[in-house]
Amino acid sequence: MDLYEYQARELLKEQGIPVPEAIYAQNSHEVAEGSDQIGYPVVVKAQVKIGHRGQAGGVKLAHTRDDAILASEDILPMTIHGHSVSGVLVAEAKNILHEYYVSISVDRSSRDFDVLATANGGTEVEEIAKEHPESVKRLHISALDDFDIEAAREMAAAIGFYHADVEQAAQILLRMWRCFKDNDATLVEINPLAKIGDPDDESSKSLCALDAKISLDDNAKFRHDGWKRFDDSTGSDSLEHQAQEFGLHYVHLDGEVGVIGNGAGLVMSSLDAVAYAGEDQGNGITAANFLDIGGGASAQTMCQSLRIVLSDPKVESVLVNVYGGITSCEQVARGIIEAIEELRMTKPLVVRFDGNHASEGLAILREEHNSMIHVAPTMEEAAQMSVQLAAQAKENRQ
Ligand code: GDP
Ligand code: MN
């Protein structure tokens, strides 16, 4: 299974390999938001499971918000070498001083691992390899011997990393190897592994993985539960992907009532309450999703959660069930108001608040005088109400 760059870079990051700050985005709105957050300039990069995106126009530098939006509007509809673009990575642009290339792959013939590397990395690496084959080093890591920091230092020097980069390169080689091994990969490639920084300031210079390509061994799938997140699908699962990007726990279900709460237990109980209410009312309404906003959620988290839940076209009403502990109901209420304005929400929302700043939160909702916002004193009543509203909306639609 091949990973997208935005997924591969997460695996590098997990091992402590430096990568630029970045977000994954699927529309120009998210690109604008992400770029503002990262700061300019940014690079906007097509997410496709094929290389040479740069040469195909799939990698663009943007100095302003408008540039970033334009770049994404160019790139998102693209098909690169037969692969349609699934989204874009918006990454902090780095000042590149030099580009190295390093890959680790399975070598079936020698039954060990190949390290292919050159001090002349970048987009032209294949041409350079053809013209100057001696500049590309092919080294091995044995499955049986230890590959430790000493071995990594030797390797970095043999590859031709500049003296000043050898120590950091050794650390990165070691971490790439761990990434390869821990993830049962068949390929871990970084091109460019770039030297970045201010040319006039020695202390600002460091190595950073500006691109990442990883393939995983499908035979090892059974021992990696986490790979489910790499399943490449469209529709509802793309909502799960989006949620993941924001650190939200979202599971897409099949019903009509969007459910948002804090804490897995409370959200599970809310799903049950919705199911009971549906049975009770005999209208077959059930929950559309599980979404746990976690502890200490901000207004922004709440707003993002509503956006994701409402992206599901089957959703007819939303139940927000928050028992404020670390999470302040006041923050949640602010998030709700923000989301309603931003999304021009037309679906009814039932809110049940208890705990931390519950009365302040309810006061904020009341002040809105919005007929779409309903408040219920208990979870059961909130579930009954949201099921009833969903059934009504569904009936009106038919
Ligand atoms: P690929 O063409 O699919 O391999 O995509 P890459 O992510 O490797 O990007 C292609 C090229 O774009 C790189 O070799 C760099 O020269 C350039 N590039 C990518 N990221 C940055 C960046 O942060 N700053 C600058 N200046 N160039 C970048
Ligand atoms: Mn590349």
Image: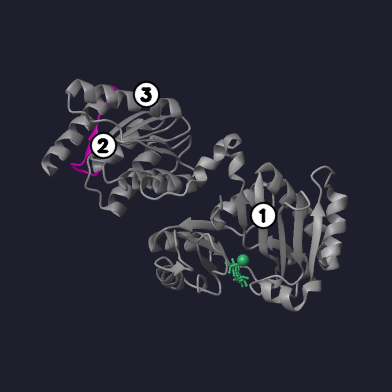
The answer to whether residue 283 shows anywhere in this view is yes
According to the picture, the residue beneath numbered tag 1 turns out to be 188
Q: Is residue 365 left or right of residue 26?
A: left
Place of residue 176 in the rendered image (x, y in percent of width and height, measured from the top left): 72, 52
Q: Are marks 3 and 2 in contact (CB under 8 Å)?
A: no
Q: Quadrant of ligand 1?
A: bottom right
According to the picture, the residue beneath numbered tag 2 turns out to be 256
Q: Is residue 290 left or right of residue 40?
A: left
- Distance (Cα) linking label 1 and label 3: 42 Å
The crowding category of the residue bearing disc 1, from other C-alpha atoms within 10 Å (few below 14, some 14 to 19, many at least 20), is: many
Residue drawn at the location 74% of the way across and 79% of the way down: 131
Place of residue 259 in the rendered image (x, y in percent of width and height, measured from the top left): 33, 34
> Which of the two labelled residues, at mark 2 and mark 1, occupies the earlier sequence position?
1
Residue 269: mark in rendering: 3
The answer to whether residue 40 shows anywhere in this view is no
- Distance (Cα) linking label 3 and label 2: 17 Å
Quick one: SS at disc 1? strand
Question: Looking at the picture, which amino acid does disc 1 mark?
Answer: Val
Most foreground residue, 378 or 304:
304
Question: Looking at the picture, which amino acid does disc 3 mark?
Answer: Ser
Residue drawn at the location 34% of the way across and 27% of the way down: 270
Q: Is residue 323 left or right of residue 124?
A: left
> Which of the two labelled residues, at mark 1 and mark 3, occupies the earlier sequence position?
1
Most foreground residue, 14 or 8:
8
Residue drawn at the location 45% of the way across and 29% of the way down: 264
Q: Magenta segment, which residues?
A: 368-380
- In this rendering, which labeled residue sits more in front, label 3 or label 2? 2
